Image (spheres, grey):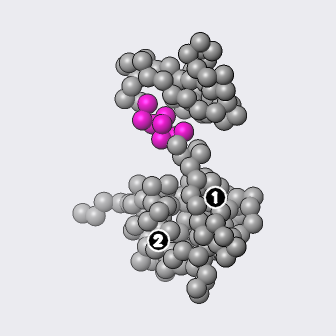
Amino acid sequence: MLKIIWNKEDIDVIKKKLYDEYQMVLATDPNDLPSDKVGLLVEEKDIDRIKIVLDMISEEKSQIVLQTQQGWIQVYVKQMTYLESFGEEIYLHQENQPTEIIKQPLYQLEEMLKPFHFVRIGKSYIVNITKIRYIRTGFNAKLDLELVTGDHLSVSRSFVTEFKNALGIQKKED
């Protein structure tokens, strides 16, 4: 048997996602768990599928710590939409949060965020690909992205192939 424990306040979102996407049902047993936790029981035949569930739970609550001009802030990765470099300043754009100025270089942020579905789309931009609403072709072989926040970003020509590979939509060359 495999036992997974997490906070009860997160349970409604996780419970719905587990059922809708993985057809897994949560079960609570007060005899086996601390009073402030719930567990997920998985049959042995489904053990291989548990990695997907663990990744989903991990991403749901993943946070990173970033240095700002006022100190350090802790940010939920899933709220981040994109990062923008303008001169010496890096702007962090988030859903329903004010823009923050980050004191780390863009190349360091790019490496830090790669595991969380972020991809470089230009010399000055990194975007969270889970926050893209539409992708449209633009002029000069560029792509226009519309984010869930309504912001529009362009994928530079030199980054189009890398961007398409990250999304898994790159055509194979013959």
Above or below, 109 against 123 in this view is above
Can you name the residue that lies furthest to the top here?
Answer: 31
Direction from residue 148 to residue 19 in the image, left or right: left
Which element carries disc 1, helix, strand or loop?
strand
The quarter of the image holding the N terminus is: top left
Above or below, 152 against 172 in this view is below
Residue kind at label 1, given as amino acid type: Gln
Query: 1 and 132: which one is in front?
Result: 1
In primary-sequence order, the first of circles 1 and 2 is 1
Above or below, 131 against 12 in this view is below
Labelled disc at residue 25:
none
Query: 37 and 166: which one is in front?
Result: 37
Q: Which residue is mark 2?
A: 108
Q: Residue at 46%, 20% (x, y): give it.
A: 42
Residue at mark 1 to residue at mark 2: CA–CA distance: 17 Å
Indicate whether residue 92 is drawn in magenta: no
Direction from residue 152 to residue 142 in the image, left or right: left
Q: Which residue is mark 1?
A: 74
**Measured from the top left, where is residue 118 in percent x and y?**
50, 61
Total numbered labels placed on residues in the image: 2
**Measured from the top left, where is residue 23 in percent x and y?**
53, 24
For label 2, count other residues whose C-alpha is less than 10 Å away and answer few (under 14), some (14-19) or many (20+): few
Query: 27 and 6: which one is in front?
Result: 6
Query: 69 and 78: which one is in front?
Result: 69
Direction from residue 17 to residue 47 in the image, left or right: left
- The residue range painted magenta reads 50-57
Residue kind at label 2, given as amino acid type: Gln
Of badges 1 and 2, the one in the foreground is 1
Indicate whether residue 55 is drawn in magenta: yes
Q: Which secondary structure dominates the residues rendered in magenta? A: helix
**Measured from the top left, where is residue 6 in percent x and y?**
59, 32
**Measured from the top left, where is residue 3 in percent x and y?**
48, 23
